[in-house]
Image (tube, helix red, strand yellow):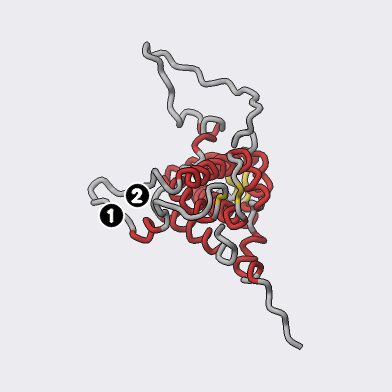
């Protein structure tokens, strides 16, 4: 008796494992994209966006764990998040959340008018328009699942910050991906690599530049996997985190259609 081969779109234990373990499901990703654009989001694009978001959050949690370990603590607190970002500029993502969270108060700068008087911060208002901050609570279950997978625990304030950063990052990723589709390619692509002041800047990686083509293929109504990869190069600094995010997103979607 012969065994029937698995269907191509569902074959590949590595991809199935990635999809099953992903803390951010395609339905959640597509809900975020619907807040930003009316374009269709392909299945591979949703998985790629989920993978990139997971990679970024995993790196942040890992950095926070290192900061907590330095103080002989196991439970993560907001101060560990700040320490992680201070140690690695690549982790500085989801900037719109910084103005909303008490954790980042005083770090985003104080605004002064022409006469040197402090400009009061905007009051939060209820908006009918969905935003990344309003929808941050949708990511709590995924954040907690990711923390468990990393064998980490965090206080509620830390979970809320990870929540907000994930929501803002994915929303910005969606906006950039939609822009790539509308403009037919990447229009503002660059690489930022932190170096010491007395060291020459390394030349841009050829492999890195090839990951974000200046033009795209496909129709102008569908966000595909490659559009997510291009948007990722716009959201993340050039460095280890960007390369890791791109690599893992490709692996997570290797058996799915790119369109």
| Rendered view: 114 above or below 183 | above
Q: Which residue is mark 2?
A: 193
At 41% from the left and 54% from the top, the residue drawn is 213
Farthest residue, direction bottom: 1
Q: Position of residue 207 (x, y in %)?
A: 37, 61
At 66% from the left and 27% from the top, the residue drawn is 128
The answer, for residue 109, to whether it is visible in the render is: yes
| Rendered view: 167 above or below 14 | above
Image mark for residue 159: none
Q: Nearer the viewer, residue 31 or 164?
A: 31
Q: Position of residue 259 (x, y in %)?
A: 56, 57
The answer, for residue 69, to whether it is visible in the render is: no
| Rendered view: 243 above or below 100 | below
| Residue 187: quadrant of the picture | top left
Farthest residue, direction top: 115
Q: Nearer the viewer, residue 121 or 82?
A: 121
Q: Position of residue 180 (x, y in %)?
A: 47, 46
Q: Nearer the viewer, residue 127 or 87?
A: 127
Q: Contact (CB < 8 A) between labels 2 and 1?
A: yes
At 37% from the left and 13% from the top, the residue drawn is 114
How far apart are labels 2 and 1 at the CA level?
A: 8 Å
Check disc 2 and report its element: helix, strand or loop: loop
> Which of marks 1 and 2 precedes in the sequence?
2
Q: Which residue is mark 1?
A: 202
Q: Nearer the viewer, residue 170 or 101?
A: 170
| Residue 48: quadrant of the picture | bottom right
Q: Position of residue 215 (x, y in %)?
A: 42, 52
């Amino acid at each position: 008796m012969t065994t029937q081969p698995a269907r191509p779109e569902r074959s590949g234990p590595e991809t199935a494992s990635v999809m099953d373990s992903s803390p951010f499901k395609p339905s959640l990703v597509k809900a975020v994209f619907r807040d930003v654009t009316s374009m269709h989001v392909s299945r591979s694009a949703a998985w790629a966006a989920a993978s990139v978001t997971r990679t970024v959050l995993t790196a942040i949690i890992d950095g926070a764990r290192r900061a907590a370990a330095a103080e002989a603590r196991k439970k993560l607190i907001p101060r560990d998040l700040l320490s992680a970002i201070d140690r690695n500029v690549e982790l500085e993502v989801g900037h719109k959340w910084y103005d909303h969270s008490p954790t980042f108060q005083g770090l985003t700068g104080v605004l002064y008018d022409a006469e040197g008087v402090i400009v009061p911060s905007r009051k939060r208002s209820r908006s009918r328009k969905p935003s990344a901050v309003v929808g941050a609570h949708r990511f709590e279950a995924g954040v907690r699942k990711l923390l468990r997978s990393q064998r980490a625990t965090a206080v509620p304030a830390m979970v809320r910050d990870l929540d907000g950063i994930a929501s803002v990052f994915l929303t910005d990723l969606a906006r950039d991906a939609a822009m790539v589709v509308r403009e037919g390619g990447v229009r503002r692509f660059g690489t930022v690599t932190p170096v010491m002041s007395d060291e020459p800047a390394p030349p841009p990686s050829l492999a890195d530049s090839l990951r974000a083509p200046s033009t795209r293929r496909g129709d102008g109504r569908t966000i595909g996997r490659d559009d997510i990869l291009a948007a990722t190069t716009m959201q993340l600094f050039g460095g280890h985190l960007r390369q890791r995010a791109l690599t893992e997103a490709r692996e997570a979607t290797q058996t799915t259609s790119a369109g």
